[in-house]
Image: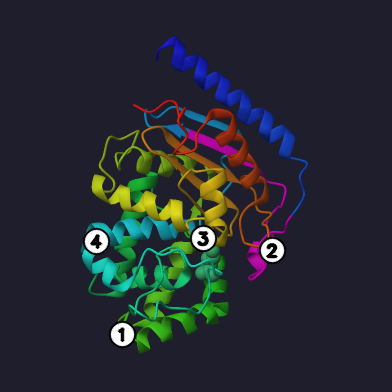
């Protein structure tokens, strides 16, 4: 590593330590409470993690603390669907238009008979329906293998969260049956919902999210193993949809002020991707009304501002 890279890394790490100190006392927001397991998490956990496309790692705070990936999974499953079925077939069922409505809105794009985009629940359930496999076991295996390629280990599912999601997920059931009635998904709704709930219940850490981000930012090449985890051309579509739809109905403001393709989940994680540079992740379970981590938003805003990380910043550094 060159001296310049070393210096930049130290500078960035220092900034992360400073932001962690500064926002640790921020108590705004509440953990998600639609299931008891999420309401009971320790609200004070806080982590900031980063990994460059060269595999250098930075971590401040609770970077090894596990939490459920929740909606961040939608991005990975979208990549898998594009890889398996190709862009055209995916676009037949799921569009790419931001909605400005809540992520769990019971809403389809009526004009085109599609789910609006893959980052809202309707789109994500339609994408999960496309997970390949003749039987439910094969489909679970397909999903498991995908996670394993990113994480470098067999994913662990939080079974209590999974069961709770299944028991309480009637809104998602309503969305799925609406899509079945319109011929958008196949007639195996409970099986697909179960897969969807399982994908949301996978346990990850902030370090894991930074690694996933670095892989996508590295055009699909895993920074540590060199494996092509997801095809190069697919990462372009993943990044685009993350930028336009990844932060719930805050996506427009996020694109404007932060400008980093990202996906957040109600478990408290935010996964950010800096194309050609690396992955950036935060974890803090207190959420704002929209569903984004309050401390996570602040950290991303500050880092984007201080290091000119906005995708369209004329001074955006560090690309290769
Ligand atoms: N399991 C949640 C749901 O489907 C995911 C929510 C999220 O992270 O946005 O409602």
Label 2 crowd bin: few (<14), some (14–19), many (20+), radius 10 Å: some
Contact, CB < 8 Å: mark 2 with mark 3? no
Q: Is residue 304 visible?
A: yes
Residue 73: percent from left, percent from top: 44, 58
Q: Residue at label 1?
A: 183
Q: 249 or 33, which is in the foreground?
A: 249
Could you tell whether 169 is left or right of 199 in the image? Answer: right
Label 4 crowd bin: few (<14), some (14–19), many (20+), radius 10 Å: some
Res. 87 mark:
4
SS class of the residue under badge 3? loop
Q: What residue is rendered at 73% in x and 34% in y?
A: 22
Q: Is residue 82 above or below residue 24?
A: below
Res. 39 mark:
2
Could you tell whether 289 is left or right of 192 in the image? Answer: right
Q: Which quadrant of the figure has residue 191? A: bottom left
Q: Report how far apart the C-alphas of labels 2 and 3 lie in the structure.
A: 14 Å
Q: 95 or 64, which is in the foreground?
A: 95
Which mark is first along the chain, 3 or 2? 2
State whether label 3 is within 8 Å of ligand 1.
yes
Q: What residue is rendered at 54% in x and 61% in y?
A: 248
SS class of the residue under badge 1? loop
Which numbered mark, 3 or 4, is in the foreground of this view?
4
For the record, the magenta segment spans 29-50
Q: Residue at label 3?
A: 70
Residue 49 magenta = yes
Which mark is first along the chain, 2 or 4? 2
């Amino acid at each position: 590593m060159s001296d310049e890279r070393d210096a930049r890394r130290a500078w960035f790490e220092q900034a992360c330590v400073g932001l962690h100190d500064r926002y640790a006392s921020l108590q705004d927001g509440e953990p998600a409470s639609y299931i008891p397991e999420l309401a009971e998490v320790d609200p004070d956990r806080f982590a900031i993690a980063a990994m460059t496309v060269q595999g250098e790692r930075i971590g401040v705070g609770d970077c090894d603390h596990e939490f459920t990936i929740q909606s961040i999974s939608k991005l990975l499953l979208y990549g898998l669907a594009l890889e398996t079925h190709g862009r055209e077939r995916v676009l037949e069922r799921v569009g790419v238009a931001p909605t400005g409505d809540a992520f769990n809105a019971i809403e389809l794009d009526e004009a085109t008979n599609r789910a609006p985009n893959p980052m809202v629940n309707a789109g994500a359930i339609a994408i999960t329906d496309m997970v390949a496999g003749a039987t439910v076991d094969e489909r679970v295996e397909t999903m498991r293998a995908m996670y394993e390629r990113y994480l470098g280990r067999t994913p662990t599912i939080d079974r209590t969260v999974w069961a709770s999601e299944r028991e309480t997920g009637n809104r998602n059931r309503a969305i799925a049956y609406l899509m079945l009635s319109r011929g958008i998904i196949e007639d195996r709704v409970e099986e697909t919902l179960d897969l969807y709930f399982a994908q949301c219940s996978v346990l990850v850490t902030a370090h894991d999210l930074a690694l996933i981000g670095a892989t996508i930012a590295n055009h699909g090449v895993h920074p540590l193993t060199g494996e092509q985890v997801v095809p190069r051309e697919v990462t372009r579509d993943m990044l685009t949809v993350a930028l336009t739809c990844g932060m719930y109905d805050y996506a427009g403001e996020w694109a404007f002020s932060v400008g980093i393709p990202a996906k957040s989940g109600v478990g408290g994680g935010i996964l950010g991707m800096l194309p050609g540079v690396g992955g950036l992740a935060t974890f803090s379970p207190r959420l704002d009304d929209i569903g984004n981590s309050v401390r996570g938003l602040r950290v991303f805003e500050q880092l984007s501002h201080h290091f000119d990380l906005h995708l369209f910043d004329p001074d955006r550094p560090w690309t290769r």
